[in-house]
Image (cartoon, helix red, strand yellow):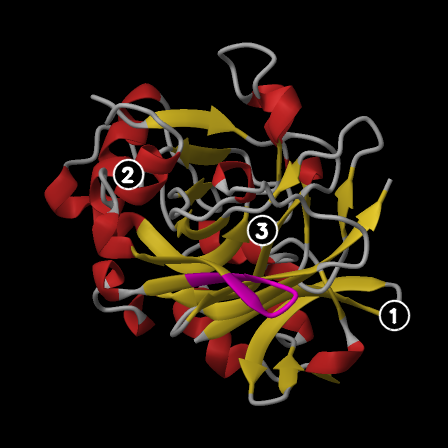
Amino acid sequence: MKLASFRAGNKASYGVQRGELLCEPGDEFLGRYPDLRAAIAADALPELEASATGATHAVDTVQFLPLIPQPDKLLCVGVNYRPHIEEMGREIPDHPVVFVRFPGSQVGHKQPVIRPKVSEQFDFEGELAIVIGKNARHVSRSDALDYIAGYCCFMDGSVRDWQKHTMQFTPGKNFDKSGSMGPWLVTRDEVTEPSALTLTTRVNGVVMQRGRVADLVFDIASLVEYCSVFTELLPGDVIATGTPGGVGAARSPQVWLKAGDLVEVDIPGVGLLGCPVANE
């Protein structure tokens, strides 16, 4: 099942993707679970498909919203693909490099990501993200995948000079509307082996990144295990798993995003996330 959060007219909602249509839940279901995060928290996804009997919208007529409205936590993992570690001149870390993004730093599919006026070093990072399906604390690696509701594409837009102001990544990763996630939450049952997934990032149709999830230093189960030790993961929390090699900062000459560009994160079996770039 593929699920999306979107705005149709003046109403924010969510629904099931059926071909070129998005089908909202019926009024009774929406009354109980007003957004996708609430449906995940109530373990209501198994009944959502049959309950998608409400308003129907053509996919190309809605405004996609960030997939999970106001997640409690949006955790990102840096330097987690071996080729990216090598191109950035770093050592393989002993533990996952975890930083936080704020919900306001994200937009939905087809919505513009914003290059801030204080920097020209706006970089692209295509990633696979996971969405947590139930409360997780001190989860073992062997059980970790059972706590995942589904998967989505993620664009971790990075303002490199601000990222490098100090050893902390936070400023460069949290400019308003600098990243994106979506278009779909693909439920876990449709991705039987996440390590077999591949990821491609394109800028204006040109391939910039290619990677295999199998190349992660810390795989998805290890990330859930690790993060669940230092914080309780809640339904709707997002973990972005890292980016492959090929980022703009590591190229010669360097490649920075500019207004008018189109960034696409393509993960077959999960989705194709497209983000136009605009200036602040």
Residue 102 locus on image (x, y percent):
62, 31
- Closer to the eye: label 1 or 2: 2
Viewer-proximal residue, 81 or 176? 81
Residue 35 locus on image (x, y percent):
63, 56
- Say whether residue 16 is left or right of residue 228: right
Is the residue marked by circle 2 packed among few (<14), some (14-19), or many (20+) residues within 10 Å? many
First-in-chain label (1 vs 3): 1
The C terminus is located in which quarter? top right
**Tag shown at residue 9:** 1
Q: Give the farthest residue toward the bottom.
A: 19
Q: At 63% across and 88% down in the image, what residue appears?
A: 20
Res. 131 in view: yes
First-in-chain label (1 vs 2): 1
Q: Which residue is mark 2?
A: 224
- Residue 141 vertical placement versus 22 (above, below): above
The region drawn magenta spans: 200-207
- Residue 202 vertical placement versus 158 (above, below): below
**Tag shown at residue 68:** 3
Residue 93 locus on image (x, y percent):
25, 23
- Say whether residue 212 is left or right of residue 106: left
Amino acid identity at mark 1: Gly
The N terminus is located in which quarter? bottom left
Q: At 69% across and 81% down in the image, what residue appears?
A: 59
